[in-house]
């Protein structure tokens, strides 16, 4: 594999976005409880894209996850991100009256394709 091909994957934001969506989909799909916590590297591991992870790629993953925090579908504490079945408010309290649309989408979807579309709309 040439150097150009290797660096293109890190520069391709939509490819990283698809990996994040796939990782979120798999983490939520396999969840047995009501909440999943993860780091940016763990999301790449869920997506199967954790080999040869460069800091720039983790920065892009962190950017995408931070954008989802701004959209109130993820919650971030000091070291980890969390996605819960129910909406987590900005002060960290769980609102059990309102379900998280991303959680519901991931549980219902048979593949990460729909999750990729939704994340593209939320982040880009």
Image (cartoon, rainbow, N blue to C red):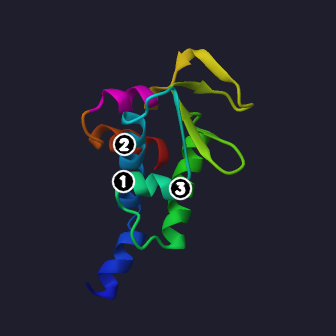
Answer yes or no: do the residues labelled 2 and 1 have beta carbons within 8 Å?
Answer: yes
106 part of magenta stretch: yes
| Residue shown at 54% from the left, 49% from the top | 65
Sequence-wise, which precedes: disc 2 or disc 1? Answer: 2
Q: How many marks?
A: 3
Q: Which residue is mark 3?
A: 40
Crowd band around label 1 with a 10 angstrom C-alpha radius: few (<14), some (14–19), many (20+): some
In the drawing, what numbered circle is on residue 47? 1
Residue 17 visible from this viewpoint: no
In percent of width and height, residue 1 lies at 25, 84
In the drawing, what numbered circle is on residue 75? none
Instruction: Quadrant for residue 70, please give it.
Output: top right
| Residue shown at 52% from the left, 52% from the top | 64
Sequence-wise, which precedes: disc 2 or disc 3? Answer: 2
In the rendered view, would you say 54 is above or below 31? below
Q: Which residue is mark 2?
A: 26
Sequence-wise, which precedes: disc 1 or disc 3? Answer: 3
In percent of width and height, residue 112 lies at 30, 42
Residue range corresponding to the magenta coloring: 103-109
Residue furthest toward the top? 97
């Amino acid at each position: 594999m040439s150097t150009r091909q290797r660096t293109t994957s890190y520069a391709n934001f939509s490819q990283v976005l698809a990996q994040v969506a796939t990782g979120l989909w798999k983490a939520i799909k396999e969840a047995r409880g009501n909440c999943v916590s993860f780091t940016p590297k763990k999301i790449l591991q869920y997506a199967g894209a954790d080999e040869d992870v460069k800091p720039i790629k983790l920065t892009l993953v962190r950017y995408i996850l931070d954008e989802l925090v701004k959209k109130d579908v993820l919650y971030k504490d000091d070291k980890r991100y969390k996605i819960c079945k129910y909406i987590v408010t900005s002060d960290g309290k769980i609102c059990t009256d309102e379900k998280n649309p991303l959680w519901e989408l991931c549980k219902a979807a048979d593949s990460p394709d729909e999750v990729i579309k939704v994340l593209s709309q939320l982040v880009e």
